[in-house]
Amino acid sequence: MVGSDGEGIGIKWQKFLKESERTCPKFELGLTFEDKGEFSEAITNYAIKEGKEMKYHKNDKVRCVVKCKHESCPWQVTLRFNKDDKCWRVSVVKDKHDGCVRTQNNSMVNSSIVAKRWKQQIRGNLEWKTNSFLEKVLTDGHYILSKKQAWRALVKAKGEIKHEAEDYFNKIWNYVLEIKRTNPNCTCEVKVSDLKENRKERFLRMYICWEATREGFKHCRKIIDLDGCHLKCKTGGQLLTAVGIDANESLFPIAYAVVEGENKDSWTWFLQFLKKDLKLGPLVQSEYTLMSDKQKGSHTSL
């Protein structure tokens, strides 16, 4: 037993960091939580990580006592409300398991918890099907889900990811204004679609060429490499890039654009801005070489 009710005088209290939810929370005497909800989530994450089942023995307005579900195990954490600081603080810690074994069938696991723990991995694997996700959770997470729980977790996580992406797109206009305020000499252009949703403009493309890269390219080789790649997100799209080669034979980024797809119209739109930024007029075009992934082993003059 590390502490008891009423102990902790003279201790510098440590605040619980939410980042630790993704690993394994370590409960210590004096650890402070904003509310019981934050504490409950930490308990669940600990139980899943350690493969243990917990039970709430007392849970009222001033105290929350959590013990290991195995009766002979002494593991316990007690949380108490501190009136002076108006927060919840760990007052008792018995951080040792004895007599209980690790289990993969954890009753504390539910679809909401799984969705939150796996959201980042799901973001990068939106094509995951239920069976593939189930296998991944069992292999990496070491706990068992039902097929229905896995399906619900995927639906919840993908729903949150979709809403986050929509929020990011809604902030593009503020992002553009901030770029122009802090980097007035850079080129940042946004094109909206001719189609509108609920009478609102819909984002289509965005082009950026920073002043620093534009000026830096003047000291690079007169070679421009063009390429495009898929964006692995719910909204899809393509990232178009233009890069050069500096004096150290390293790639030097010049400009990039997020577009709806890799087609003639989007490439023409991108190259028109690039040509203007680099001042590639008729008198100097013959001095530059343009390369793309569709012309391996060859090069074309601008």
Image (cartoon, helix red, strand yellow):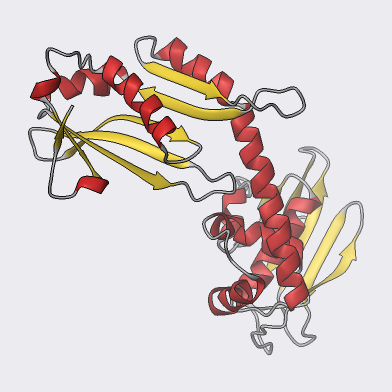
> From what the image shows, is residue 7 above or below residue 97?
above
- How many numbered discs, if any? 0
Residue placed most toward the observer, 63 or 156? 156
Is residue 143 in view from this perspective? yes
The picture places residue 49, in percent across and down from the top left corner, at: 61, 71
Q: Residue furthest front?
A: 264
Q: Is residue 238 left or right of residue 134?
A: left
Residue placed most toward the observer, 181 or 228? 228
Is residue 43 in view from this perspective? no
> From what the image shows, is residue 3 above or below residue 11?
below
- Which quadrant of the structure image shows residue 249? top left
> From what the image shows, is residue 202 above or below residue 75?
above
The picture places residue 79, in percent across and down from the top left corner, at: 78, 57
Q: Is residue 285 left or right of residue 146?
A: left
The picture places residue 94, in percent across and down from the top left corner, at: 68, 71
Residue at image coords 80%, 39%: 86
Residue at image coords 45%, 42%: 238
The picture places residue 220, in percent across and down from the top left corner, at: 12, 27
Q: Quadrant where the C terminus lies?
A: top left
> From what the image shows, is residue 252 above or below residue 55?
above
- Which quadrant of the structure image shows residue 200? top right
- Which quadrant of the structure image shows residue 29? bottom right
Q: Quadrant where the N terminus lies?
A: bottom right
Residue at image coords 71%, 48%: 33
